[in-house]
Amino acid sequence: MKKRKITELLIFIISAELTGALSALIAGDTSEFYSELVKPPLAPPGFLFPIVWTILYALMGISAFLIYETDAEESVKKNALLVYAIQLFVNFTWSIIFFRFEMPGLSSIVIVALFILVAVMISRFCKIRPAAAYINIPYLIWVGFASYLNIAIWLLNRAAV
């Protein structure tokens, strides 16, 4: 791979990772709030989330780069990358709403919207470059699982939150 392409790939990966890191920074200390919640079955330990999200953000960056560097029609690429940017922004807001503002009801709406946006992104990416879509399937599955957790946490903790 040419040096320029490697640089562009790293920019996509780092920008996705920085989005997650900035969201986590703004969300603040998540461990205390999460540990105090009544959690549904299958809820993973809190330490697992940053590991999974780091991997998923890297995959998002790689997939966006794959779309960016294709020879597809410019307007089609821009549209797909716009959906990518919107879902990344919605992703950014979720942890702030859930953890910083401790609003699992509102964050349930946000994460369902995120799930839909990720599905739309995958669909758009698939039309341009299937590999870019396929590497986001773990992300879609994780957001689906996170939606279950978020909604269940909201329902189980409505009186407390």
Image (cartoon, rainbow, N blue to C red):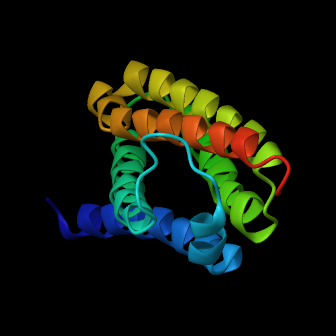
Image vertical order of residue 56 relative to residue 127, above or below = below
Q: Residue furthest left?
A: 1
**Splitting the image into 4 quarters, where does residue 151 fall?**
top right
Dividing the image into 4 quarters, which one contains the C terminus? bottom right
- The answer, for residue 78, to whether it is visible in the render is no
- The answer, for residue 24, to whether it is visible in the render is yes
Query: Is 139 left or right of 151, judged from the image as shown?
Result: left
Which percent across, then down, holds residue 52?
36, 57
Which percent across, then down, holds residue 20?
53, 66
Query: Is 57 left or right of 107, judged from the image as shown?
Result: left
**Splitting the image into 4 quarters, where does residue 17 fall?**
bottom left
Query: What residue appears at the point 70 percent right and 77 percent down from the top-left corner?
Result: 26
Nearer-the-camera pick, 107 or 130: 107
Nearer-the-camera pick, 84 or 69: 84
Query: What residue appears at the point 30 percent right and 38 percent down from the top-left corner?
Result: 135
Which percent across, then down, holds residue 113?
70, 34
Query: What residue appears at the point 70 percent right and 43 percent down from the top-left corner?
Result: 156
Image vertical order of residue 55 relative to residue 116, above or below = below
Nearer-the-camera pick, 116 or 71: 116
Query: Is 91 left or right of 72, judged from the image as shown?
Result: right
Image vertical order of residue 90 relative to residue 25, above or below = above
Nearer-the-camera pick, 3 or 27: 27
